Image: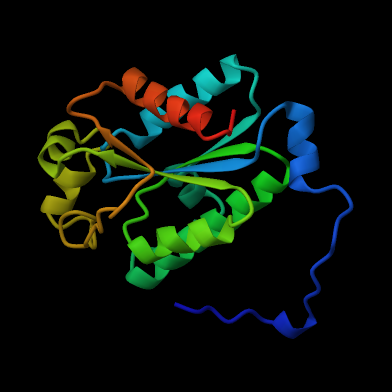
Amino acid sequence: MDFERSGATNDHCQKHEINKHSRASLMGQKPAVVWMTGLSGSGKSTIANILERLLHGAGKHTINLDGDQIRMGLNCDLGFSDADRVENIRRIAEVSKLMTEGGLIVIVSTISPFGADREMARKLMSDCKFIEVFIDTPIEECIKRDPKGLYARAKTGQIKNFTGLDSPYEVPAAADVHVKTMQAGPVESASLIRRYMEQNGVM
């Protein structure tokens, strides 16, 4: 979906002498985006926090972008229609790209239900590593956990267009890392992602 931008014809892309790779080299790392996708209650935020702690302990410079927190601030004007979901992910992807310009390893945890939006984010990060991580938790387990009480509210009609119930979630066809939370706990899951990062030159 395309969004019109006022004044777009007046925009000019400023070229910088110091780029993301120069900044990242000072940190001993490569800029990257670790994009975690999965249903509400799947464990994305928990795993993201543990992964950031592991990377911080290894001396890496990170930023953790949580979907709920971004919706409370930057994206507080957006609802949950399909169009708003697309715009939500577009903004998160653009912020992630800006963070990689600082040489950071960006950890994103957001439902991002549509495959086309996740692919858009990957293409936006074409000159740095983009790692799509599918946090695979069966919806029955997510409903059982329901840490925020969202599924209960959705089932009673208090929340409309809830992903996994009355709004679709498109399972990644070929995620870079497939985390099956029924087989691995949060620490093991975060370690799995870190190993992938090490094996693919991010660390």
Q: Using the image, determine if residue 46 lies above or below residue 97.
A: above
Residue at 48% x, 64% y is 120
Q: Is residue 117 left or right of residue 92?
A: left
Q: Using the image, determine if residue 181 lies above or below residue 136.
A: above
Name the residue furthest top. Answer: 57
- Quadrant hosting residue 162: bottom left
- Quadrant hosting residue 56: top right
Please indicate, yes or no, whether residue 1 appears anywhere in the rendered image.
yes
Q: Is residue 25 left or right of residue 99?
A: right
Residue at 73% x, 42% y is 102
Which of the pair 14/199 is nearer the observer? Answer: 199
Task: State the scheme by which the image is colored.
Answer: rainbow
Name the residue furthest right. Answer: 17
Q: Position of residue 135 (x, y in %)?
A: 30, 39
Please indicate, yes or no, whether residue 7 appears anywhere in the rendered image.
no
Q: Position of residue 7 (x, y in %)?
A: 73, 82
Q: Position of residue 146 (x, y in %)?
A: 20, 36
Q: Quadrant of the N terminus?
A: bottom left
Name the residue furthest bottom. Answer: 9
Number of marks in picture: 0
Residue at 54% x, 50% y is 73
Q: Using the image, determine if residue 114 lies above or below residue 172.
A: below
Q: Quadrant of the C terminus?
A: top right
Q: Is residue 11 left or right of residue 83?
A: right
Q: Position of residue 55 (x, y in %)?
A: 55, 22
